[in-house]
Image (cartoon, helix red, strand yellow):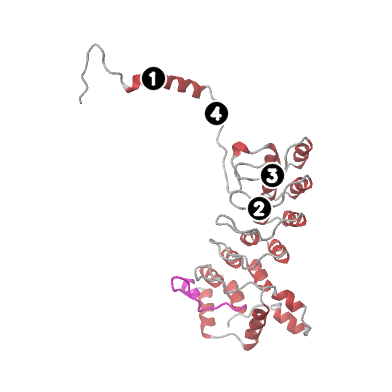
Amino acid sequence: MPLNYDSHHPPLLLADVWKPALAWLSTKVLNMDVTAARRTSLCDIGLWADRTALHEAASHGRALQLKQLIESGASVNTVTVDNVTPLHDACLQAHPHCARLLLEAGAQVDIRTVHGSTALCNACASGSLECARLLLEHGATVNPSLTALTASPLHEACIQGNVKVVRLMIDSGARLEAFDVYLGPPLHAACAKAHMDCVRELLCAGANVNSVKFHETALHHAARLNAVHMIELLVEFGANVNSSDNLGKKPVDYASPVSPSYACLRFYESNPLRLQQLCRISVRRTLGARASKAIDQLNIPSCIHSYLQYWDPPTSPE
């Protein structure tokens, strides 16, 4: 029904209705203390609004301030809304002195963030050998259950590339075939990041060279990077040069046609490994994971022991 216009009582305009409210809101805004937004980075954890002085001291490595806060009664297990503790911050920023203070004051070592990360995950992500050792000494779990949002400590170490941290995780019992939905097994993470030393460490420890993620192998990663030395290393450990991914492509299909990697893969496709090399691969596959430790216990000549442990350089195609 149409509205009847009365010249003596005109309808209220929307602006007239909201004018008092807008005036009140403007006054409030003008009187507010405005804080500039903090620049965030991949290393920022949690919401800055609920981070405590303890978090800030741990994150910036201020050990003296951290000690004073702890002595004044600050809770070392206080968390942000993302469930980040000061220990998470100290390890992510590689501050072992702060991590030690927190642990000695009773910090829980395996608290997980909303994304599933533990302090050990953070220590490995930062490449801090000292923090990782310290956490393990205090009972940190080396194989926390994986979630869709987090990788294992070994994955994090392989991504970061500190081979000493990778070795520590392996020696501490990290699962070599722990599968991340995005990264695949740790070997894939190391190959994708071109961390040659980490790749060798994993393979020598018994990682499956032909493990797959969507039918893609570590050799596919190496070919995509045109990393010829990594290709040679993977093949020496038994990588299948003819494996196809979910697109039906072999590793050679990802290598640049005029690159040394392409020539290397073509060579291996038409020239099988020597019987001696195949025997080494067979022995290590029979021994399975932790093959290196098993080989160390065998009563065999030193030259054979060295060969089985790959203490010889990979054979390059001529």
Tag in front: 4 or 1? 1
What main secondary structure does the magenta stretch of the protein show? loop
Question: Percent x, y for residue 171?
Answer: 73, 66
Above or below, comparing residue 191 to residue 146 in the picture: below
Magenta-tinted stretch: 237-258
| Nearest to the observer: residue 254 or residue 279 | 279
Residue in view at x 55 percent, y 36 percent: 37
Of pointers 4 and 3, the one earlier in the residue sequence: 4
The span from disc 2 to disc 3 (Cα, nearest Å) is: 12 Å
Residue type, numbered disc 3: Pro
Say which element carries label 4: loop
Is 29 on the left-hand or right-hand side of 14? right
Tag in front: 2 or 4? 2
The span from disc 4 to disc 3 (Cα, nearest Å) is: 27 Å
What residue sits right under mark 2 in the picture? Answer: 118
The span from disc 2 to disc 1 (Cα, nearest Å) is: 52 Å
Question: Percent x, y for residue 168?
Answer: 72, 63
Question: Percent x, y for residue 277?
Answer: 64, 84
Furthest residue to the top?
8
Q: Residues within 10 Å of mark 4 (few under 14, many from 20)?
A: few
The span from disc 2 to disc 4 (Cα, nearest Å) is: 34 Å
Say which element carries label 3: helix
Q: Are marks 4 and 3 in contact (CB under 8 Å)?
A: no
Say which element carries label 2: loop
Question: Percent x, y for residue 53?
Answer: 69, 37
What residue sits right under mark 4 in the picture? Answer: 34
Of pointers 1 and 3, the one earlier in the residue sequence: 1
